[in-house]
Image (cartoon, rainbow, N blue to C red):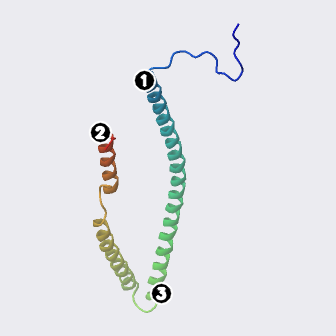
Amino acid sequence: MASVSPQSPGPRGPDPSVGELLSTVTSDVQELFRQEAELAKAEIREEASKAGKAAGMYGGAGFAGYMVVLFLSLAAMFGLANVMDTGWAALIIAGVWAVISAVLYVMGRSRMREVAPKPEQTMETLKEDARWARHPTR
């Protein structure tokens, strides 16, 4: 009577075919990609939540800054009103803000012209990946 020792793996069945191995590997890779995609989605949701809260704080800071500028402008106008007519003081403050606005517009427009609408580096990387996928041995 032949006994199987605890160290030997026991009787083995026939070796799986290449097709079966390839099918197993393909399904494992698909499962890995699904799991990675789910992990990425969860991370993106978490980061989006953090970004939303930060954006709300930026919005609050922007509004508070607006109020500071408004009241400083009013204080400057009333300060000038001590030496001239209030209408002229308001016009001078409005003119200062018009100049600031024009300067910011010109600077913003020049910066916007530097923005590339397509992510060039990413596009090139995707093209390289596609070339490799078509001919992985090259």
Point out which mark residue 42 bears: none
Q: Nearer the viewer, mark 2 or mark 1?
A: 1
Kind of residue at disc 2: Arg
Point out which mark residue 18 bears: 1
Is the Cβ of the residue at disc 2 closer than 8 Å to that at disc 1?
Answer: no
User: Can you say whether 9 is above or below 110 in the image?
Assistant: above
Instruction: Give me the C-alpha separation between circle 3 and circle 2.
Output: 74 Å
* 67 displayed left or right of 94: right
Q: Nearer the viewer, mark 3 or mark 2?
A: 2
Give whichever of discs 3 and 2 has the lower sequence position: 3
Kind of residue at disc 3: Gly
Is the Cβ of the residue at disc 3 closer than 8 Å to that at disc 2?
Answer: no
Quadrant of res 4: top right
User: Can you say whether 71 is above or below 136 in the image?
Assistant: below
Residue annotated with mark 2: 134
Q: Crowding at label 3, few (<14), some or many (≥20) Cα neighbours within 10 Å?
A: few
